[in-house]
């Protein structure tokens, strides 16, 4: 059997539909975003195009609204399945199927990704369907005590059973037939048994695939060996365009420093720039997914946007743009495609908290190919400007040699010859530097 050799040796770069279209992405959303992706992101190296939740659900229309409501509780019977209980693309959203879309993306030298939930569709159990190429009924694999606390589409699986392993294999085989390159498996991070079965199925897939594990809100370091069987691992709750998300990212940065390596990339979640929650003009009366808000452009100010991208660059997090690209500004694109930022993200190693200060925190990454170069990110965690002098040893810079220091966001550079580095950082902003021995 051919094994999966698609190990991402650098953090994946791409676009995911969730921040802008939630769980109601359809072919029109693809047609709206793909041309901009090709024009603005692909030249910078972005190559993953990912459809998030709900692509398998034939939603009932909502009178007077362009988009359906989404995966609210009670929608379980609208999931489209094949004869073996595996999700199929909804006719209403992707009438030509996902393999057609995959081949279109491949013709543009892009890679195609989809979202899945842990477990098995409840509708497949109700229909008493069989697992493909086995004598097992799908109900033989179910663990009713392992259901998700928030996703009502699926039942949990008894991962000690051969039936569960066979079901996951059958799903991965179907995605391979569709020429899928990337799977975001959701609601799986708390279930090491499911991670083991899914990662083994991906490893043995006839088609190379990247496995992204989600949703990451609760991390257990005794499960790290399971997490590392994926290629990406969400380490945060859902991240949005607010200061709380930036602060939570800082907390997780400190927690997972040093874990990034080729083949396993801790993921600080998607980048909520551009148009967000495009599918909803008003909040539902019952509060369903109220935290997502309504249609808007990203509320981050420029300093927050710089800080947000710098966090992900210095930590070598995958960079997955989450917003509608038509609504994305030139400034936002300039951050996402910045040459120096991408060099750090793609060629860095050993991300770490180098110096902790109550006002300014300093993160660092070494250069993977040049032991005489690296990056420093100075984050001002206060609402006041900060000017500080650091001795080189405080931030682990080599002493007694000349250094060329370049500001990543402005491209301005200077030669530093003394043993101090003087920095100034505006309020709630950052200074992102690349240093290199002269």
Image (cartoon, rainbow, N blue to C red):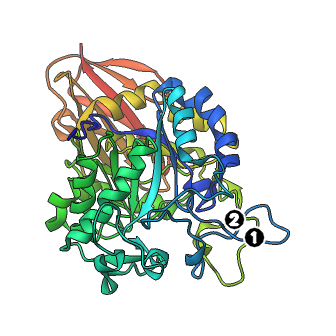
* Crowd around label 2: few <14 · some 14–19 · many ≥20 (10 Å): some
Residue 289 position, x and y percent, is: 59, 73
Residue 86 seen by the camera: yes
Task: Tell me if 301 is positioned left or right of 152 in this view.
Answer: right
Answer with the quarter of the image where residue 217 lies.
bottom left
Q: Is residue 41 above or below residue 62?
A: above
Q: Secondary structure at mark 1?
A: loop
Q: Is residue 313 above or below residue 217?
A: above
Answer with the quarter of the image where residue 9 lies.
top left
Q: Nearer the viewer, residue 94 or 199?
A: 94
Task: Tell me if 361 is positioned left or right of 429 in this view.
Answer: left
Task: Tell me if 271 is positioned left or right of 254 in this view.
Answer: right
Asked if the residues shown at circle 2 and circle 1 are in contact, with their CB atoms under 8 angstroms apart, the answer is: yes
Residue under numbered circle 1: 282
Residue positioned most to the right: 64
Residue under numbered circle 2: 294
Q: For the N terminus, give its image quadrant.
A: top left
The residue at 25%/37% (across/down) is: 365
Residue 75 position, x and y percent, is: 60, 77
Q: Secondary structure at mark 2?
A: loop
Residue 141 position, x and y percent, is: 29, 76
Q: Nearer the viewer, residue 115 or 76?
A: 76
Residue at mark 2 to residue at mark 1: CA–CA distance: 6 Å
Q: For the C terminus, give its image quadrant.
A: top left
The residue at 31%/39% (across/down) is: 208
Residue 388 seen by the camera: no
The residue at 20%/53% (across/down) is: 228
Q: Which mark is residue 327?
A: none
Residue positioned most to the bottom: 145
Q: Nearer the viewer, residue 371 or 47?
A: 47
Residue 168 position, x and y percent, is: 31, 61
Who comes first in sequence, dot 2 or dot 1? 1
């Amino acid at each position: 059997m051919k094994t999966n050799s698609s190990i991402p040796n650098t953090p994946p770069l791409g676009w995911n539909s969730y921040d802008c279209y939630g769980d109601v992405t359809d072919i029109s959303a693809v047609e709206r975003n793909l041309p901009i992706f090709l024009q603005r992101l692909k030249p910078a190296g972005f190559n993953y195009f990912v459809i998030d939740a709900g692509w398998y659900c034939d939603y009932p229309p909502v009178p007077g609204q362009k988009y359906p409501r989404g995966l609210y509780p009670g929608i379980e019977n609208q999931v489209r399945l094949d004869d073996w209980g595996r999700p199929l693309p909804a006719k209403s959203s992707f009438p030509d199927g996902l393999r057609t879309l995959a081949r279109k993306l491949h013709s543009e030298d892009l890679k195609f990704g989809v979202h899945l939930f842990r477990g098995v569709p409840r509708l497949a159990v109700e229909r008493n369907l069989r697992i493909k190429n086995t004598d097992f009924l799908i109900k033989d694999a179910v663990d009713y005590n392992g259901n998700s606390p928030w996703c009502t589409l699926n039942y949990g699986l008894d991962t000690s059973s051969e039936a569960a392993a066979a079901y996951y294999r059958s799903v991965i085989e179907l995605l391979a037939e569709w020429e899928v390159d990337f799977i975001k498996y959701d609601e799986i991070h708390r279930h090491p048994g499911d991670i083991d079965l899914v990662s083994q199925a991906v490893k043995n897939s006839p088609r190379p695939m990247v496995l992204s594990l989600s949703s990451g809100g609760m991390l257990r370091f005794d499960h790290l060996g399971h997490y590392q069987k994926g290629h990406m691992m969400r380490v945060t709750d859902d991240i949005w365009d607010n200061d709380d998300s930036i602060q939570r990212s800082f907390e997780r940065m400190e927690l997972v420093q040093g874990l990034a390596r080729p083949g396993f990339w801790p993921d600080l979640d998607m980048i909520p720039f551009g148009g967000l929650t495009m599918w909803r003009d008003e909040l539902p009366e019952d509060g369903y997914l109220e935290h997502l808000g309504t249609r808007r452009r990203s509320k981050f100010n420029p300093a927050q946007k710089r800080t947000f991208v710098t966090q992900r660059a210095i930590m070598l997090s995958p960079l997955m743009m989450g917003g509608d690209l038509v609504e994305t500004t030139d400034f936002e694109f300039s951050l996402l495609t910045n040459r120096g930022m991408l060099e750090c993200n793609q060629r860095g190693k050993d991300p770490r908290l180098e110096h902790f200060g109550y006002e300014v925190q300093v993160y660092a990454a070494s250069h993977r190919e040049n032991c005489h170069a690296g990056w420093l990110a100075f984050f001002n965690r206060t609402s006041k400007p900060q000017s500080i002098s650091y001795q080189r040893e405080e931030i682990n810079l080599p002493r007694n040699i000349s250094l060329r220091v370049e500001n990543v966001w402005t491209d301005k550079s200077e030669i530093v010859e003394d043993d101090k580095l003087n920095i100034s950082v505006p309020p709630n902003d950052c200074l992102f530097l690349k240093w290199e021995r002269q």
